[in-house]
């Protein structure tokens, strides 16, 4: 952990407030708040505009993107300036949710012509938590864009079914087993 306080960024990609992802984010925030700075970005509280309806202005100058003032840049800056970032991603129809893909595609604008920023972003340690009852391969492939080449994403898959829960009820973290597994994953640095 080093001699300085850790700066941790937590991104919950779920569009639902008070669901499993939000509750997991809060547990992570509380854990890290005592050890340093912890900031949460919750997609249920804001929207990032998807790419489109533009003339590719970001390919010339990223600030020319008509959506540059939405939260994408702030999230990317926070991740790039953190020591550790947690991505909490729900599974919708066997893939990461749309918010995660919107974040990915808009990242292209943020890092366009700024390879130094991209390298800083990729160098940040990232841990991924997936709330999913199904496929893991799609998530592993999608997360590779957020870590250095030739490394494996550090992923915790939490299946509501495994703990006798139903994902849409948002009560996964009511399970003591889930809390223990989550705590072990959070603490494993």
Image (cartoon, helix red, strand yellow):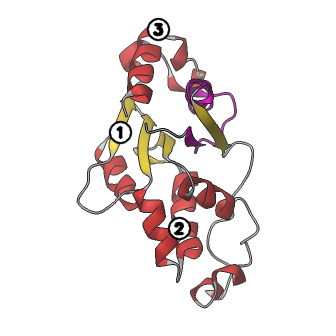
The reply to whether residue 160 is in sight is: no
> Which label number is shown at residue 155?
1
Q: Mark 3 to mark 2: distance in Å?
A: 36 Å
In the picture as drawn, the residue positioned furthest to the left comes out as 150
* Residue identified by numbered label 2: 105
SS class of the residue under badge 1?
Answer: strand
* Quarter of image, res 132: top left
Q: Is residue 15 left or right of residue 151?
A: right
> Which label number is shown at residue 176?
3
Along the polypeptide, which appears first: circle 3 or circle 2?
A: 2
Q: Position of residue 104 (x, y in %)?
A: 51, 62
Q: Is residue 117 left or right of residue 64?
A: left
Residue shown at the point (48%, 10%) measured from the top left? 175
Region of the chain picked out in magenta, as a range: 5-34
Q: Do the numbered discs 1 and 2 sit on residues whose CB atoms are within 8 Å?
A: no
* Quarter of image, res 74: bottom right
Residue in front for this viewpoint, 183 or 139: 183
Few, some or many residues within 10 Å of mark 1 (<14, 14–19, 20+): some
Q: Do the numbered discs 3 and 1 sit on residues whose CB atoms are within 8 Å?
A: no
SS class of the residue under badge 3?
Answer: helix
Residue shown at the point (58%, 75%) measured from the top left? 109
Few, some or many residues within 10 Å of mark 2 (<14, 14–19, 20+): few
Q: Mark 3 to mark 1: distance in Å?
A: 20 Å
Residue in front for this viewpoint, 53 or 8: 8
Q: Position of residue 134 (x, y in %)?
A: 35, 35
SS class of the residue under badge 2?
Answer: helix
């Amino acid at each position: 952990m080093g001699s300085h306080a850790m700066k941790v960024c937590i991104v919950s990609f779920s569009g639902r407030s008070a669901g499993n992802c939000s509750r997991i984010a809060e547990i992570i925030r509380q854990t890290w708040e005592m050890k340093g700075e912890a900031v949460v970005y919750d997609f249920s509280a804001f929207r990032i505009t998807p790419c489109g309806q533009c003339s590719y202005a970001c390919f010339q100058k990223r600030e020319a993107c008509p959506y540059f003032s939405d939260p994408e840049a702030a999230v990317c800056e926070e991740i790039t300036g953190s020591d550790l970032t947690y991505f909490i991603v729900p599974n919708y129809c066997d893939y990461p949710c749309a918010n995660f893909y919107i974040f990915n595609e808009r990242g292209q604008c943020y890092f366009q012509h700024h390879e130094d920023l991209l390298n800083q972003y990729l160098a940040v340690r990232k841990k991924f938590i997936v709330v999913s009852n199904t496929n893991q391969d799609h998530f592993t492939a999608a997360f590779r864009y957020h870590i250095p080449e030739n490394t494996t994403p550090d992923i915790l898959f939490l299946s509501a079914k495994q703990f006798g829960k139903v994902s849409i009820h948002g009560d996964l973290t009511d399970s003591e087993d889930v809390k223990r597994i989550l705590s072990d994953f959070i603490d494993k640095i």
